[in-house]
Image (cartoon, grey):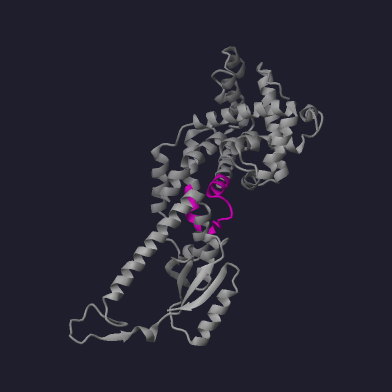
Amino acid sequence: MMATSKKILEQEPSEIEMLLPWHAAGTLNARDSRRVDEALARDLDLARQYAAIREEYAETIHLNESLGAPSARAMQKLFAAIDAEPARRPQASLNVATRFTGFFANLSPRTLAWSASLGAVLLLLQAGVIGEVLMNKRSGSFETASLSTNEPITREFGAAALPRALVRFAPDARVSDITALLDKYQASIIDGAKGGMFRLQFGNKAMTKGEVADLLSRLQSEKIVSLAVAAQ
Amino acid sequence: MQVLYGRHHVRVFRFGLRLVRSEQVAEDLISEVFLDVWRQAGKFEGRSAVSTWLLAITRFKALSALRRRKDVELDDEAANAIEDTSDDPEVAVQKKDTSEALRKCLTALTAEHREIVDLVYYHEKSVQEVAEIVGIPENTVKTRLFYARKKLAELLKAAGVERGWP
């Protein structure tokens, strides 16, 4: 393995030599990065080549950064062209879940963590507001805001209650997995995460006991769900 | 779209500019790239980074623009001649400025070599991402960059800069 780089003129380059530029740019995976580090530690010629690569890397960045930026004309041209485009077809929004997960996948871990924290706070705030509103009502009924009669038209919540469940996700569940599951079951998170449990609401119509049991059974069999129980 | 444009337009512009070597054409290019993104947003499947997707579109558009420019006989060699009217590598070395000579030689590489050097060093793309953008196998990505670097070393050597490799 000694003096690997000496053979480059006559022979094909070694795998390690070819990986050096990515090592300099910090875009190798951990395994390859370790292999390159080990090779650099024992091969002086390779280390000399790596020093040259570091120079190329720095000057390529310098060269590109010196290219400046486009003028405002490019942006004006773009947005004028977009304005001139026909109205977007509904097809563009069909695959919302995919784009949603793609969006999360492209966020940096730091941004994702902040977004998740902010989302959790907003969710709890929303739950607090809803709770407050409900506590101010005497029973499980609501009245329409537009009627001013003394005897409001009321409906019992129980008659149209949507199925809910308390769900605990597996510790290694990713945001994209959870989003896909919510999409699959037409579910939304209405409260959480108390004790690691999320309160989920399903669909837009009431279910029979049998249907709810079936739903819970399917949920429980999902890989990213560690617990699913019926909830009010 | 404004957020996406704000975040990526400079790098898209620079990548395009290094390929087409004309600010005017590169500016037209980024308008076309982001308009395509606007039209094809539904096709983005999130399997690769947005920047990788953008650079792949930019490359395709740049090559189309270069093909159009061939109609006016502005090939790569002619572009090199236009670009290098200031100090050539030898002059730069006379100024004892190796860094500047290196940048000159980076500019003198062929379009094929320039793009791979830029994608790896400046745009910090992995082997897989470069393969996706350029549309070649991963092993070809590695060997192409190796030979681009070898060519760069030859240009530097011809300019009197000896770096101990190869």
Q: Is residue B143 above or below residue A216?
A: above
Which one is in front, A190 or A228? A228
Q: Is residue B9 above or below residue A131?
A: above
Residue B82 belongs to magenta span: no
Q: Is residue A77 left or right of residue B131?
A: left
Split into 4 quadrants, where in the image is the N terminus of chain A?
Answer: top right
Split into 4 quadrants, where in the image is the C terminus of chain A?
Answer: bottom left
Q: Is residue A154 above or below residue A203?
A: below
Which one is in front, A181 or A135? A135
Q: Is residue B101 left or right of residue A157?
A: right
Q: Which residues are magenta?
A: B34-56
Which one is in front, A196 or B155? A196
Identified at 55% across, 56% down, the residue is B46
Residue A41's x, y, as percent? 72, 31
Question: Outermost residue toward the front?
Answer: A195
Which is the main secondary structure of the residues drawn in magenta? helix
Which one is in front, B93 or A187? A187
Let me know if residue A95 appears in the view. no
Let me know if residue A214 appears in the view. yes
Residue A193's x, y, as percent? 45, 65
Looking at the rendering, which quadrant does residue A48 occupy? top right
Residue A153's x, y, as percent? 25, 86
Residue B125's x, y, as percent? 60, 42
